[in-house]
Amino acid sequence: MSAGGFHVHGPHDHELEHAREHAAHGGDKGHGIGGGSLTSQVAMFTAVIATVGAIFSYMGGATQANAGLYKNNAAIKKTEASNQWNYFQSKSTKQSLAEVSRDLSPEAGKAVYQAKMERYEKEKKEIEAEARKLEATSADWDKRSDEQMHQHHRWAQATTALQVTIALAAIALLTKKRWLEWGMAGMGLLGLGIGVLAMLRI
């Protein structure tokens, strides 16, 4: 990938260059998994795995960003809920003062304070309903953030497995060991399997 006039090498680039050079000079005539040239098969396998790994890496970054955004939304709603509860407490204090004033005032003035008490009680119920709604919204954002972070960990695990696969592919090319080919294939399947779990949100 090039940007701004310089070239950024992925973890598989050097291995692919080596494989192409090796194949151009006759390469390895042995047969790997499924038959065919070991070098060309491993190079193709590595290219596919690296492409899938890049997609997994992008998805991991996206879910991590989402988790942070959702957690921030949860904190905002929590603060708004806290403000509502403070407002609720303020109304409770005013209601208590109105009650005291009603009890201490002459009979002619009691109705005024009674009306205030009833108004404060109504306002308190509305404020409480809003505060609980905000708390529920905050809890929902928290849950969504946790789900995104779990999914991010799955993508990260899948990406790591595919990076190990690429490393095994390089060693397999250098050593021509058949068991490394099978290890490479197994690790690749493991990485793809974890990627499927991430897609399924498991």
Image: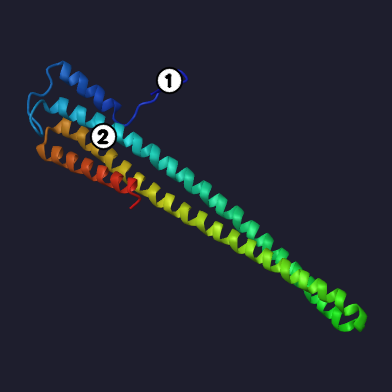
Q: Nearer the viewer, residue 47 or 95?
A: 95
> What residue appears at the point 21 percent right and 42 percent down from the top-left corner?
189
Q: Is residue 71 left or right of residue 43?
A: right
Q: Is 142 situated above or below 62?
A: below
Residue 100's disc number? none
Q: Amino acid at mark 1?
A: Phe
Q: Nearer the viewer, residue 58 or 125?
A: 125
The colour scheme used to paint the residues is rainbow
Q: Is residue 120 left or right of residue 66?
A: right
Farthest-out residue, top: 25
Percent coordinates x, y for residue 169 in the rendering: 20, 34
Q: Is residue 120 left or right of residue 52?
A: right
Secondary structure category for the residue under label 2: helix
Residue 6's disc number? 1
Percent coordinates x, y for residue 98 in the rendering: 83, 75
Q: Amino acid at mark 2?
A: Ile
> What residue appears at the point 26 percent right and 34 percent down from the top-left corner?
49
Q: Is 100 situated above or below 145?
A: below
Q: Nearer the viewer, residue 174 or 1?
A: 1
Secondary structure category for the residue under label 1: strand
Q: Nearer the viewer, mark 1 or mark 2?
A: 2
> What residue appears at the point 24 percent right and 39 percent down from the top-left corner?
165
Q: Quadrant of the N terminus?
A: top left
Q: Could you tell which of marks 1 and 2 lies nearer the N-terminus? A: 1
Distance (Cα) linking label 1 and label 2: 24 Å
The image quarter containing residue 87 is bottom right
The image quarter containing residue 199 is top left
The reply to whether the C-beta atoms of the residues labelled 1 and 2 are less than 8 Å apart is no
Percent coordinates x, y for residue 113 in the rendering: 85, 75
Residue 49's disc number? 2
